[in-house]
Image (cartoon, rainbow, N blue to C red):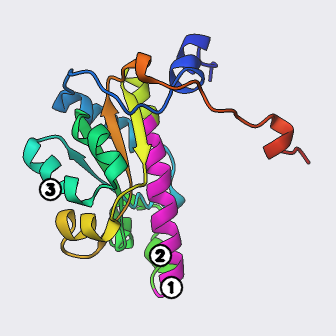
Amino acid sequence: MPSLSDAALDQLFRNARTHRWWDDRTISEDTLRAIADLAKMPPTNGNSSPGRFVFVVSQAAKEKLKPHLDEGNVRQTMSAPATVIVAHDMEFYEKLDFLAPHSKDARSWFTGSPETIARTAIHGSTLQGAYIIMAARSLGLDCGPMGGFDREGVDRTFFPDGTIKSNFLINLGYGIPEKLHPRAPRFAFEDFCRIE
């Protein structure tokens, strides 16, 4: 597999930033579907795919989300063209007959162990949320992931059946680069990695 170009790596990683200010361009439903179609492809544990996503776009949906946002996140979220609620299905294992047909016992890997279910659900949805970010960036969008919100309130509002739990939010849109702060420092390799 060939390496990506420097321009692609810049877009996905080196020049990509967390945005909090957005211009007024909208995001089409086709683009949101394309993001999901890309983000569903990378790996999760046993192909369990526990992530569940709500693309909050309409004004009515935004108003449902607004009361559950931390005060500092209201403006950036309400002005974003779309906000993704990244969540996880605590009964993801019920779909494994479809998702893992090559492993007939896949469901048994998780059932009977609440700790394994919870760990797999949160890890998987976090991975899949990161894939959403990379998919959105690859399609020319900017992202603003955040955790400042009332999860129980969001769950009651958007997932009232109780089996899906919210993890974090991602604002999507076209960021205003002039509003960015200088990039915060990053570790040198030796400060967070080692090779053994």
Q: Is the magenta stretch mostly helix, strand or loop?
A: helix
User: Which of the two residues, 164 or 142, is positioned nearer the viewer here?
Assistant: 142
Could you tell which of marks 3 and 1 lies nearer the N-terminus?
Answer: 3
User: Which residue lies most toward the right here?
Assistant: 196
Circle 3 — which element?
A: helix
Name the residue beneath numbered marker 3: 64
In the image, the segment drawn in magenta is: 112-133
Spatial separation of the CA atoms under disc 2 and disc 1: 6 Å
Q: Which amino acid does label 2 sit on?
A: Ile
User: Label 3 is placed on what type of residue?
Assistant: Lys
Give the secondary structure at mark 2.
helix
**Image coordinates for residue 17, horizontal then vertical, percent:** 50, 28
Q: How crowded is mark 3: few (under 14 residues within 10 Å), some or many (20 or more)?
A: some
Q: Can residue 19 be seen in this view?
A: yes
- Disc on res. 113: 1
Residue at far left of view:
60
In this view, the residue in front, 5 or 85, is 85
Q: Is residue 132 visible?
A: no
- Residue 123 falls inside the magenta stretch: yes
Q: Which mark is residue 117?
A: 2
